[in-house]
Amino acid sequence: MKANFMQLKIGIIGLGRIGKIHYSHIRHQIPEAEVVMVSDVDKNGLPRDVKHGNAEELIAHPDIDAVVICSPTDTHSAYVEECARRGKHVFCEKPLDLSLARIRETLKVVRQHNIQLMLGFNRRFDANFVKLKTLVDTGKIGDVQLVKITSRDPAPPSVAYLKSSGGLFLDMTIHDFDMARYVMGKEVKEVYAAASVLTGGAVAEAGDIDTAVVTLKFEDDSMAVIDNSRKAVYGYDQRLEVFGSKGMAHVENNKPDSHVYYHEEGVASALPLHFFMDRYTTSYLTEMKAFVRSVQEKQPVPVGGSDGLKAALIAVAAQQSVEKNAPVALAGGE
């Protein structure tokens, strides 16, 4: 980054788990940016060394150039639109909204006011997945025929979270839908999903699903297979495989250490990391650096609103496929 760039002045709306991660990264590891103000409905525990205010005050603040939105999903579209009208660039956690119509309305406002909008698909910035993407882009895998993604959480979130999340596909699998598009470099034309409630508990109470297998068919008839679970007792299970005409590449789980213990009763090693923020901490930093750089250099963001809409389209089609017990052709268009 050029040394003569002024610091990007940032406001953060929502200081929950992800908001705190972004706040810490910007304050301590991204010297090209500065947190000017933060906002959260819970006033307890807010950092004392930065100005506080409500979301409307933050968006209207004359010194703020860009806003990082980490508030609940049902607030995202309204905040993004208000930022756009005031000329503030936006980094927004996914999804932009649970309604496809609302997402399209918001993207129209963003285009009208010509701001930068980046969606928080942080897995694109994980070094392991970037390496697989590079192998695909440089032709080392050949013609990619099949992508396999495993994404399983160690435990379901709370009932309250589940009830407002939009369901497994829009809340959790949406990351995998985006990764499939990202790695393949192609668009999805058909979705076929099967899902069940197998863990009970909070998921059943919330009326959601906890286990799913989704097959995506791309425009050239290549495919991706995604399996999800809300409850993997051994940790945060994140694996990806790319198979093509010239070979195969895969990424295994990250672990706290790489030891393998061999003994007379078998072989043992460390379990996968147990929390998504442990697994993807570096990717959150890398994505925020990319956002800051894009705004300062006036370059397109690496993950834009169109990517968010396309992932949401796949998620909605997956839900429809479960309900119909049949493949669903993807409805396109922005």
Image (spheres, helix red, strand yellow):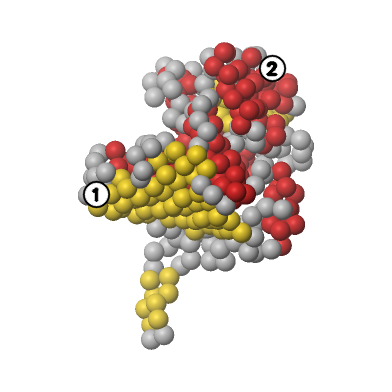
The answer to whether residue 52 is left or right of residue 250 is right
Q: What mark, if any, has residue 60 been given in the picture?
A: 2
Residue at position x 73%, y 53% from top? 206
- Occupied quadrant, residue 220: top left
Q: Nearer the viewer, residue 71 or 176?
A: 176
The answer to whether residue 262 is left or right of residue 319 is left
Image location of residue 328, percent across then percent down: 52, 43
Residue at position x 39%, y 68% from top? 259
Q: Which amino acid does label 1 sit on?
A: Ser
Q: What mark, if any, has residue 137 been given in the picture?
A: none
Element assignment for label 1: loop
The answer to whether residue 76 is left or right of residue 110 is right
Circle 1 sits on which residue? 245
Element assignment for label 2: helix
Image location of residue 153, percent across then percent down: 56, 57
- Tally of numbered tags: 2
Residue at position x 67%, y 44% from top? 165
Camera sees residue 274: no
Image location of residue 6, percent across then percent down: 49, 18
Residue at position x 25%, y 39% from top? 138
Q: Which of marks 2 and 1 is nearer the N terminus?
A: 2
How far, Cα to Cα, is label 2 from label 1? Answer: 53 Å
Q: Which amino acid does label 2 sit on?
A: Ala
Query: Decide: marks 2, 1 in contact (CB < 8 A)?
Result: no
Camera sees residue 207: yes
Outermost residue to the bottom: 264
